[in-house]
Amino acid sequence: MMNDTIAQISSALGQGAISIVRLSGDKSFEIVNKIFTGPNLKEVATHTVHYGHINYNGKNIDEVLITVFKAPKTFTTEDIVEINCHGGVFVANKILETLLLEGARSANPGEFTERAFLSGRIDLTQAEAVMDIIEAKSDLSLSLANKGLDGEIFKLIVGLRTKLLNIIAHIEVNIDYPEYDDVIELSNIIIKPKIKDLLENINNLLEKANYGKVIKDGVKTAIIGKPNVGKSSLLNALLREDKAIVTEIQGTTRDIVEGSINIGGIILNLIDTAGIRESDDFIEKIGIDKAKSVINEAELILFVLDNNQLLSTDDEKLLDLTKDKKRIIIINKTDLNKELAHTFKHSIAVSALNKTGIDDLENMIKQMFLSGEVNLIDQTYISNARHISKLNEALMSLKDALKAIKDELPIDMVEIDLKNAWSTLGEIIGDTSTTSLLEELFSKFCLGK
């Protein structure tokens, strides 16, 4: 419903200097005026701040600063009021409760941003970029999110759809005026090269999308190996803190231990797993089963071996289990000055205890996921999983169109595949988007955004 006025706390709940309660809708000024001792908000200039108090039933709730934004030059294109009150859960909730009693409705998660999208203020990629900015954990991920908010992804998708529309227009002319072009000539000389060009464009985007996804979401990384090879020591060395318990007793780590680090703009989501071996201990077996589950989901395996031990049957099983995964073999305990017992591709020697070789390991990880410098100035990276999925769908439709041309199917059959690709790309930016898609997308937003 766009004809009601919504309200919600837009700042994080908790103790702090200030909290912000936001309203959006036609009755924003009217509702706030009922409880605000200060100037009439309907009469003040837009984009101005006003001092006063929030009162209800003759009782003073708080001293506030109120910012007024008048339609249409606002985030939602509706009238917006932001009440800056003193920080604290009780005060902000009391003001929100008062606004709801005066006729506002509690906003759903993401509803302010949804209204901005529905009013045409932003497209769907920009709406998603809002949450990416909030959730950014590095300079690279923040820059990537700002590119989306600036409309760079929108421009890129519109460019692809425009090319598709030009091809479809050629076909439409041929259908309406069969004498205009020879069908074979139209298919092979005019349309086929343009489809191939589009396929190349989308393939390039998908190749770079891996970089974007790594920058945005980080890399789920599992530290695995037998008991007592130094997995927990490695986790502590990478995190630069003693997060995992380290002892000489085998099987100390019974459950997964997690932490995150920033390596040159890449967030590494580290998971230290229980040592994997044959065990009769019930609790240890649960940890081992969890460790095997983590291996299946991990995008990078840090496989730790003890430099001073020969490969065991358990090691061999783990090597085979992870052979198709992206992995680095870490030869640990080099501080004991013994000759390296193992050699592997993508391996590195470290002493997790003395924290030697850790910088080299971090550089190897960065090169593995971001080969060369990522250029966020001149290039646009797709990082959203939904966008990547839709690009792949469009890619398949274009390949179907090429196959239809090869099989010499009627030109209107080729057009169906091209229109499918055009429609699928439209779903990325919110053109032809469905109600269920919007509900699912905005439900993931935080309250008040």
Image: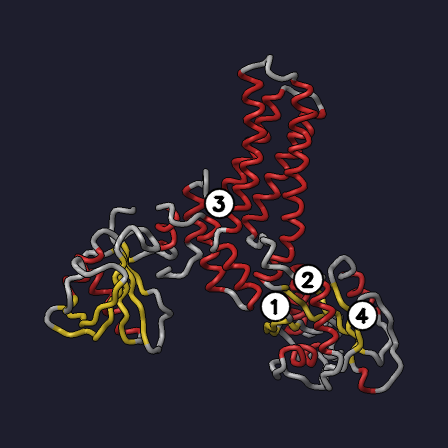
Q: Residues within 10 Å of mark 3 (few under 14, many from 20)?
A: many
Which residue position holds label 1?
265
Please tell me whether mark 1 or mark 4 is closer to you in this view: 1
354 or 375, nearer to the observer: 375
Marks 4/2: CA–CA distance: 18 Å
Would residue 358 be seen by someone viewing this image from the given angle? Answer: yes
Q: Residues within 10 Å of mark 4 (few under 14, many from 20)?
A: some
Which residue appears at 18% of the width and 72% of the height? Answer: 53
Amino acid on which disc 1 is placed: Gly
Amino acid on which disc 2 is placed: Leu
Would residue 280 be seen by someone viewing this image from the given angle? Answer: no
Looking at the image, is mark 1 or mark 3 earlier in the sequence? 1
In the current view of this chain or complex, which residue is farthest to the left? 58
**For the residues bearing labels 2 and 1, Cβ distance under 8 angstroms:** yes
The x, y position of residue 230, in whole percent, is 73, 79
Which residue appears at 51% of the width and 65% of the height? Answer: 136
Which image quadrant is residue 13 in? bottom left
The x, y position of residue 124, in whole percent, is 45, 48
Marks 3/4: CA–CA distance: 43 Å
Which image quadrant is residue 422 in? top right
Q: Is residue 214 left or right of residue 313?
A: left
Marks 1/3: CA–CA distance: 27 Å
